């Protein structure tokens, strides 16, 4: 298994998404994700709103992810986003998007995207 650690994050309004670790083994990828809700109301980031795009514009689903979805006010939650499909050849980075976010202080457009997540070599 190859591992990349770091801080790949994006903030929109009162919500911050950070990827702190990427694991790759035999084309399978797992992202370790933290969501921080700095608002005074809960937000929901549903698992079926998770999308991953690679730098070659291929899309991956993440239905087997270990992701709770509910981030209560003033708290941080952690989970893993597990890509259902194997990575294609020549992929160097991923973009993680959470869409369909709900809550009183959800980001405009109900989505947040973290670009430039490197694939460990």
Image (spheres, grey):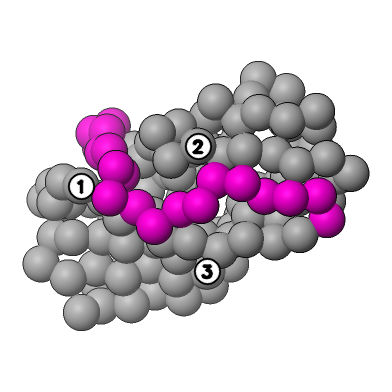
Q: Which mark is residue 55?
A: none
Classify residue 53 as left or right of residue 13: left
Q: Nearer the viewer, mark 3 or mark 1?
A: 1
Is residue 18 at least partly visible in the picture?
A: yes
Identify the residue shown where x is 51% and y is 52%.
68
- Residue on which disc 2 sits: 46
The quarter holding residue 76 reads bottom right
Secondary structure, magenta segment, majority class = loop
Q: CA distance from mark 3 to mark 2?
A: 20 Å
Q: Secondary structure at mark 3?
A: strand
Label 1, label 2: how far apart the Cα atoms are: 16 Å
Q: Earlier in the sequence, mark 3 or mark 1?
A: 3
Q: Count residues near mark 3 (Cα–Cα under 10 Å), then give few for <14, some for 14-19, many for 20+.
A: some
Quarter of the picture containing the N terminus is bottom left
Of callouts 1 and 2, the N-terminal one: 2
State the mark number for residue 84: 1
Q: Nearer the viewer, residue 79 or 53?
A: 79
Q: Nearer the viewer, mark 1 or mark 2?
A: 2
Q: Splitting the image into 4 quarters, where does residue 54 fall?
A: top left
* Relative vertical location of residue 2 with respect to residue 107 in this rendering, above or below: below
Q: Secondary structure at mark 2?
A: loop
> Pointer 3 and pointer 1: residues touching (CB < 8 Å)?
no
The span shown in magenta is 54-74
Q: Residue furthest top?
A: 109
Element assignment for label 1: loop
Report the front residue among 33 and 10: 33
**Pointer 3 residue:** 20
């Amino acid at each position: 298994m190859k591992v990349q650690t770091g801080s790949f994050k994006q903030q929109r309004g009162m919500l911050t998404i950070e990827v702190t670790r990427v694991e790759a083994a035999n084309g399978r990828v797992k992202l370790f994700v933290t969501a921080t809700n700095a608002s005074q109301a809960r937000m929901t980031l549903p698992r079926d709103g998770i999308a991953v795009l690679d730098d070659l514009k291929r899309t991956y689903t993440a239905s087997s992810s270990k992701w709770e979805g509910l981030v209560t006010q003033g708290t941080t939650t952690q989970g893993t986003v597990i890509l259902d499909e194997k990575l294609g050849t020549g992929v160097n980075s991923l973009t993680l998007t959470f869409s369909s976010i709900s809550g009183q202080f959800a980001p405009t457009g109900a989505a947040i995207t973290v670009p430039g997540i490197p694939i460990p070599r």
